[in-house]
Image (spheres, grey):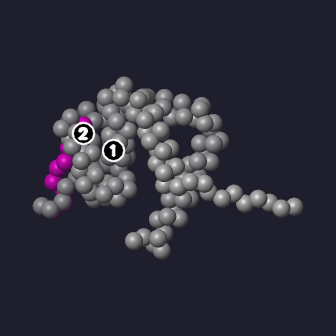
């Protein structure tokens, strides 16, 4: 029996960015009800779970460059949801969640869950789980040292 091997059609980068934009729009619409964007909710979540964290470490864990992190932190610092304080030495800084930031995260979490449930219902839980596994595998493979510039 001849098995047909599937070949990719189109640009992988375009297709993944297109999916990312659609998902971001969906989550942004729901999180807007809590006054946040998806990127802001993600930052609050990372700081909540990692405790006080150096900006460089936060950027690394989120897969962001330093300038993008700085730009994304500004509105959260201005709103008083995060604070940046001195670290262990004069050159280091730590980002921490404030009480109002914790409250904002709690408020937004219900909206995030609603967006997640909607995606699961639309795509199917099995497809979403398979997508997560595929994305994790691809991230691991593309992060391998042999592919780093």
Residue farthest toward the left in the current orientation of the protein: 90
66 relative to 96, above or below = below
Is residue 129 inside the magenta stretch?
no
Residue 59 found in image quarter: bottom left
Percent across and percent down for residue 72 are 27, 45
Residue 110 found in image quarter: top left
Is residue 84 inside the magenta stretch?
yes
What residue appears at the point 46 percent right and 65 percent down from the top-left corner?
143
Percent across and percent down for residue 86 are 15, 54
Percent across and percent down for residue 93 are 19, 55
In the image, 116 versus 54, the foreground residue is: 116
- Specify the quadrant that holds the C terminus: bottom left
Q: Are marks 2 and 1 in contact (CB under 8 Å)?
A: yes
Residue with the mark numbered 1: 43
Callout 2 secondary element? helix
What residue appears at the point 60 percent right and 36 percent down from the top-left corner?
123
Percent across and percent down for residue 138 are 54, 59
81 relative to 133, above or below = above
Residue with the mark numbered 2: 76
Q: Earlier in the sequence, mark 2 or mark 1?
A: 1
The crowding category of the residue bearing disc 2, from other C-alpha atoms within 10 Å (few below 14, some 14 to 19, many at least 20), is some
């Amino acid at each position: 029996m001849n098995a047909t091997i599937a070949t990719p059609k189109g640009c992988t980068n375009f297709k993944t960015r297109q999916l990312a934009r659609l998902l971001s729009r969906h989550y942004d619409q729901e999180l807007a009800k809590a006054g946040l964007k998806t990127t802001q909710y993600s930052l609050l979540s990372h700081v909540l779970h990692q405790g006080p964290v150096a900006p460089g470490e936060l950027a690394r864990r989120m897969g962001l460059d330093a300038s993008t992190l700085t730009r994304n932190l500004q509105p959260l610092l201005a709103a008083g949801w995060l604070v940046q304080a001195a670290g262990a030495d004069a050159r280091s800084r730590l980002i921490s969640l404030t009480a109002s930031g914790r409250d904002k995260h709690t408020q937004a979490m219900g909206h995030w869950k609603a967006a997640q449930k909607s995606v699961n219902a639309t795509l199917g839980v099995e497809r979403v789980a398979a997508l997560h596994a595929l994305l994790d595998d691809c991230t691991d493979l593309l992060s391998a040292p042999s592919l780093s510039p």
